[in-house]
Amino acid sequence: MNTEAVLRQAAEFAIAYRAHIATADRTPTQDLQATLRAFDGPLPDAGEDGPQVIEALASAAEPGLRASAGARFFGWVIGASHPVGVAADWLTSAWGQNAGNPVAAPAAAAAEAVAARWLLEVLGLPDAASVGFVTGATVANMVCLAAARGAVLRRAGWDVEANGMFGAPPIDVVIGEEGHATVYSALQFLGLGHARVHKVAADAQGRIIPAAFAGVLAGLSGPSIVILQAGHVSTGAFDPLPALIPLAKAHGAWVHVDGAFGLWARACPARAALAAGAEDADSWATDGHKWLQTPYDSGYAIVRDAEAHARAMTIAASYLPVTAGERDPSHYVPELSRRARGFATWAMLRHLGRQGIADMVARHCRLAQRIATALAAEPGVQVMNKVVLNQIIVRFGADRSTEAGDALTRDTIRRVQDDAVIFAGGARWRGEWVMRLSVISGPMDNAEADRSAAAILAAWRAALAAA
Ligand SMILES: *Cc1c(COP(=O)(O)O)cnc(C)c1O
């Protein structure tokens, strides 16, 4: 096996791919079924040469790759896997470190320790908070809520880490009606149940209504966890944190903030006011693979009470070293063996710097505004949210009945996806279909924004003509 040949070949494929998607209009060029056929075949009996396998992988995969690392991708909330993060990730794989154990991988532990400190600094969170490097905000929410569960039950005289949930005092979980679906899955993993929550009414932007929140809290006594949101996945809106957090704290609740992408507003002076007050919460979930542009997978579980965090996650075994006074990467995440995620985060924070992150967030928000303005100028097209951040929801045929508007909106989305100049998906917002656009791709600029708005309007006009 020629190690050098196979690694160089992968690098060449990667470089060529990035050059291709910088200009390519249509990706993927092949659907899932065709791609399945390209990958398929009998399990080989005899092994194949490395370079031959990598060549086969690239040729099977490339027609089925979505250019989510390119500029004109607006689906879900997906960062653009920045080249510097990718390069750091290549090294991470090549180095083959097991980040679960600081003796097995001292450099991985060191990069995480420093990246953790930088993250707290750039996000303006308490410097004594602990940071777990997890796969994404789903697991970050789960880890933070595990720490919350342990801490509120401990105050009620119950050790949940030792004794589990059977017989424990009940916990009241309070969440806005527009909380993200992954928070509910975290509740479901933790024995808190996705259905036994107190849902608080939200306003037209999806923000918790403070009076409704106070009303729910007033009816509760005993251990409680409040889950707030910084950045709604459709509207980009923030729960009114400065009004809600003090109320929750006065009630003795643990306050968790799901800020998968929105927490990064704190790194941008022009947008920081949106997430002001978040620093008073007890835990925060956010992603690297959204606004920090690290490659997948990368999320951060951040907890003010580092001991509660570690109690919920620590794995103890005789063969695992105990490092008194030093940060043990495995104490803040569910896994033992895992990829050394700190390298890519360290590299991206160092590459962008405080200023680069602030500028990028400001640019994406400005471009979201630019696209929203272009779309809203067209008759029959309505932007359904206040574009305070980087998310836009748009309805086509907004002047028609709900049914007709739904049909026109879905047809516009289908045409946009068929044209493939950009990618945008749909969502239901308050009972109606909308197109959802997330401006979070690193390379996005004015020209790409204008071209994207034009592509959406062309699809809308075609949908209208065909109706
Ligand atoms: C994306 C997102 C999540 C889930 O994050 P993953 O990184 O996909 O696990 C949770 N909450 C919000 C608000 C999100 O936008």
Image (cartoon, helix red, strand yellow):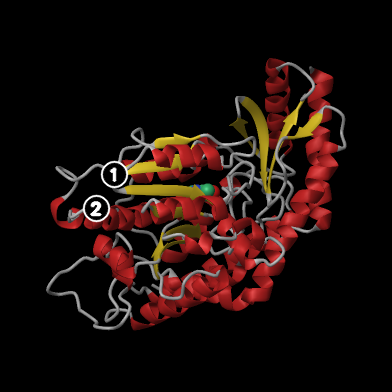
Q: In the rendered image, which quarter contains the C terminus?
A: top right
Residue 171 has which mark?
1
Q: Is residue 19 left or right of residue 430?
A: right
388 or 89, which lies in front? 388
The residue sitting at 28% across, 75% down in the picture is 101
Tell me if residue 337 can be seen: no
Residue 118 placed where, x, y %? 51, 76
Q: In the image, is residue 255 above or below residue 414?
A: below
Residue 321 placed where, x, y %? 20, 79
Q: Is residue 272 left or right of residue 44?
A: right
Location of residue 338 by image quarter:
bottom left
**Label 2, on which residue?**
153
| Element type at mark 1 | loop
The residue sitting at 78% across, 38% down in the picture is 456
The residue sitting at 33% across, 55% down in the picture is 148
Q: Is residue 319 left or right of residue 442?
A: left
Residue type for callout 1: Ile
| Element type at mark 2 | helix
Q: In the rendered image, which quarter contains the N terminus?
A: bottom left
Residue type for callout 2: Leu
